[in-house]
Image (tube, rainbow, N blue to C red):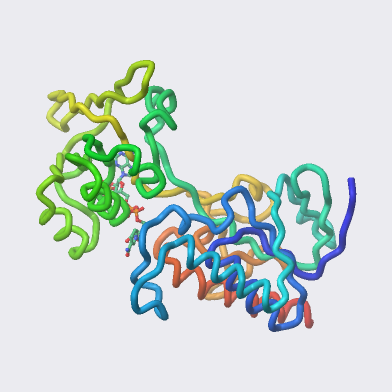
Amino acid sequence: MTQEKVKCLIIGSGPAGFTSAIYASRANISPVLYEGIQPGGQLTTTTDIENFPGYPKGITGTDMMEDMRQQSIRLGTDVRVGDVSKVDFSVRPFVVTIDDEKDILADSVIIATGASARYLGLESEMKFRGMGVSACATCDGFFYRKKDVAVVGGGDTACEEATYLAGLCKKVYLIVRKDFLRASQAMQDKVFNTPNIEVLFKYNTKEVLGDEDGVIGAKLVNVDGSEKIINVDGFFLAIGHNPNTSLFKGQIDLDAEGYIKTKGLSSETNVAGVFAAGDVKDSHYRQAIVAAGSGCIAAMDCELFLRQ
Ligand code: NDP
């Protein structure tokens, strides 16, 4: 196994990772950033971003992440393709293994691995993943033009995806397990003002139905026990996220949901020299701008740690 010594290692390439890279570069701590399996992170699977300051006309997630990447590189970050396969935070320097083939010996680590979409956990849902079942309307919506689809969830993501899909598809069912939407009022208004979205309140999904060509429908069950079948070609999940922390279990403190615990307003984990930023430590706000701010905090904490 080859080895390389670095001062500051950043894991992850979303807004948190790249903002920490920008600040760490300017602080002269020579950051090395590994992009992970989804370069650019979750924003590369979203539609237009209209709430990130500085883009008066909005910007696509992919373009924004490419801008952040270029900015990091211009300021001196060594941005690399590769995924972390193992970490050992019990030794100094920390040992971070990349793709099972290279060990990075790092004086400090900033974890910005984000979160991933959650699935319902149905066998039928797994069976038809990639064959009609998707957790990303922006990535896959195109395949369902003029067809009927369903979106599960009642939060901002579900509403955003339902309205996006309504622009492409004939009909969109929004399957909500409660009798209200949790989404912001603005998103709710959009949903209720879109004629080809039908909200099915108080329904859970019992089974995703399909044949050898993929999804053909879904069997839903109402809270009163009655069942209903909808005919759809696409079945989209928008029910929240899980933090990408499986690598760090047993290495640093996580909360009950698996998010990295940090001290107060700082990015410090329980291991001195290991910092966390963005959605991997934030189960509440989960916004690009918050993740970016969190990346800035991590780089400043990290610089101070290295100086001391
Ligand atoms: P949320 O956690 O806000 O919503 C998840 C939704 O999925 C809830 O309606 C929840 O139902 C439902 N759900 C969870 N598990 C299941 C299940 N097993 N079966 C059926 N339904 C389920 O996640 P989001 O991804 O929507 O949003 C995350 C954060 O990002 C929020 O803070 C949101 O405001 C923000 N966001 C902001 C956007 C914007 O400002 N443009 C766009 C997208 C997200 P229940 O309500 O019953 O718990």
Is residue 266 or residue 154 the one in the foreground? 154
Residue 301, compared with residue 124, is above or below; it is below
- Quarter residue 210 falls in: top left
In the rendered image, residue 34, in percent from the top left (x then y), is placed at: 69, 58
Residue at the right extreme, as displayed: 2
Quadrant showing the C terminus: bottom right
Horizontally, residue 26 falls left or right of residue 104, namely left
Q: Residue at x 73, y 70 (%)?
A: 31
Q: Residue at x 29, y 50 (%)?
A: 161
Residue 69, compared with residue 46, is above or below; it is below
Horizontally, residue 65 falls left or right of residue 147, namely right
Q: Residue at x 61, y 75 (%)?
A: 71
The answer to whether residue 238 is seen in the rendering is yes
In the rendered image, residue 254, in percent from the top left (x then y), is placed at: 57, 54
In the rendered image, residue 72, in percent from the top left (x then y), is placed at: 64, 73
- Quarter residue 178 falls in: top left
Q: Residue at x 40, y 28 (%)?
A: 131
In the rendered image, residue 197, in percent from the top left (x then y), is placed at: 15, 45
Horizontally, residue 276 falls left or right of residue 241, namely right
Quadrant showing the N terminus: top right
Is residue 69 or residue 129 the one in the foreground? 69
The answer to whether residue 256 is seen in the rendering is no
Residue at the top extreme, as displayed: 212
Is residue 252 or residue 116 the one in the foreground? 116
Q: How many marks?
A: 0
